[in-house]
């Protein structure tokens, strides 16, 4: 009976077990496959994953904060996305070998209503989630500008991934705005912390906020009020999870079952 899990620290808040269990049930695999959560401290990560890979009962794991870079570092094989992004959120165990992938990149593109190839896109942030977003959007042909609170970090990430760093972007210039910063999680004022104002948005723009909270974020509330198309972090969570499940099972999971489970 193949096992799957999300490994993080902390991990109790993760919606992945409910979401992936619902997808497995819809696929008729609930009796065969299980998906749980493993809280593993950074010091124990490598040993734990090596044991899971060697034991043979785990087909793979999702990896979340703070282990994504460590997951890539210990892999025997790395997908082009994981290698370029410098982080893995999906590990597969095959014959004792560890294969690393990054489905945050494909999940981000899948959560958007259309391709932004050839169009100007603004990514806010330069951390791990930003690296996945920038790499995916550049690969898809978008013209990506990066703004980050710590400008030097934004400049380094933009240069490495084929984007352009900007210090004072005009939000009206962009067809798509993606927030990858953690702003909104700890109750910060979004419009103080980011180079946006509540009236920054226009009809015809798309705005994606990777942060997910119980209530719609201040960013998405303002964008929706302006008539922009909004995509929340839960939709991206569903899409990256569906890609991971496809890698492990070879099956096409039900996005609707996964959406229902994460929004419950
Ligand atoms: P990270 O590597 O720690 O990066 C955090 C980023 O947020 C940095 O660019 C940082 O800027 C910026 N930031 C933090 N506090 C800020 C503030 N008060 N004002 C302005 N900028 C601030 O984190 P991460 O792994 O990229 O994750 C970021 C968020 O994305 C998390 O909330 C995570 O849950 C979410 N995420 C969602 C999904 C999904 O599927 N929906 C997937 C992956 C990640 P500095 O460089 O200046 O510190």
Image (cartoon, grey):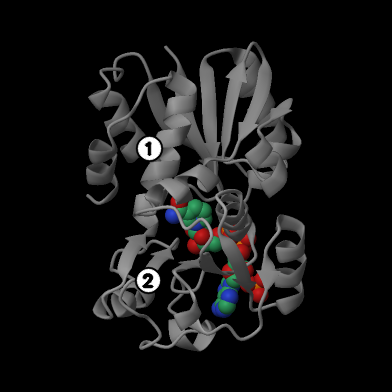
Question: Which secondary structure lies at badge 2?
Answer: loop
User: From the viewer's perspective, is residue 29 above or below residue 68?
Assistant: above
Asked if disc 1 is less than 8 Å from ligand 1, the answer is: no
Asked if disc 2 is less than 8 Å from ligand 1, the answer is: no
Q: CA distance from mark 1 to mark 2?
A: 33 Å
Mark 1 or 2: the one toward you: 2
- Residues packed near mark 2 inside 10 Å, few (<14), some (14 to 19) or many (20 plus): many
Q: From this viewpoint, is residue 259 visible? A: yes
Residue designated by label 2 = 205
Q: From this viewpoint, is residue 44 visible? A: no
Q: Quadrant of the N terminus?
A: top left
Is 90 on the left-hand or right-hand side of 112? Answer: right
Q: Position of residue 201 (x, y in %)?
A: 37, 81
Looking at the rendering, the quadrant in which ligand 1 lies is bottom right
User: From the viewer's perspective, is residue 12 above or below residue 252?
Assistant: below
Residue designated by label 1 = 17
């Amino acid at each position: 009976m193949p096992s799957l899990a999300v490994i993080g620290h902390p991990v109790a808040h993760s919606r992945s077990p409910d979401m992936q269990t619902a997808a497995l049930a819809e696929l008729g695999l609930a009796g065969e496959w299980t998906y749980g959560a493993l809280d593993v401290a950074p010091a124990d990560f490598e040993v734990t994953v090596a044991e899971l890979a060697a034991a043979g009962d785990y087909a793979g794991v999702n990896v979340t904060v703070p282990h994504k870079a460590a997951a890539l570092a210990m892999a025997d094989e790395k997908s082009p996305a994981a290698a370029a992004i410098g982080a893995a959120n999906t590990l597969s165990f095959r014959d004792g070998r560890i294969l690393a992938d990054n489905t945050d990149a494909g999940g981000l593109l899948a959560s958007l209503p259309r391709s932004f190839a050839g169009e100007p896109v603004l990514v806010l942030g330069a951390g791990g989630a930003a690296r996945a977003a920038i790499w995916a959007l550049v690969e898809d042909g978008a013209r990506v500008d990066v703004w980050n609170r710590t400008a030097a970090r934004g400049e380094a990430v933009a240069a490495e991934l084929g984007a352009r760093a900007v210090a004072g972007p005009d939000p009206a210039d962009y067809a798509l705005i993606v927030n990858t910063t953690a702003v909104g999680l700890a109750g910060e004022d979004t419009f103080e912390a980011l180079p946006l104002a509540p009236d920054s948005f226009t009809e015809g723009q798309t705005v994606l906020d990777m942060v997910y909270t119980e209530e719609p974020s201040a960013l998405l509330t303002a964008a929706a009020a302006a008539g922009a198309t909004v995509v929340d972090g839960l939709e991206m969570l569903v899409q990256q999870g569906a890609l991971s499940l496809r890698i492990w099972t070879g099956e096409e999971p039900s996005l609707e079952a996964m959406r229902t489970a994460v929004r419950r």
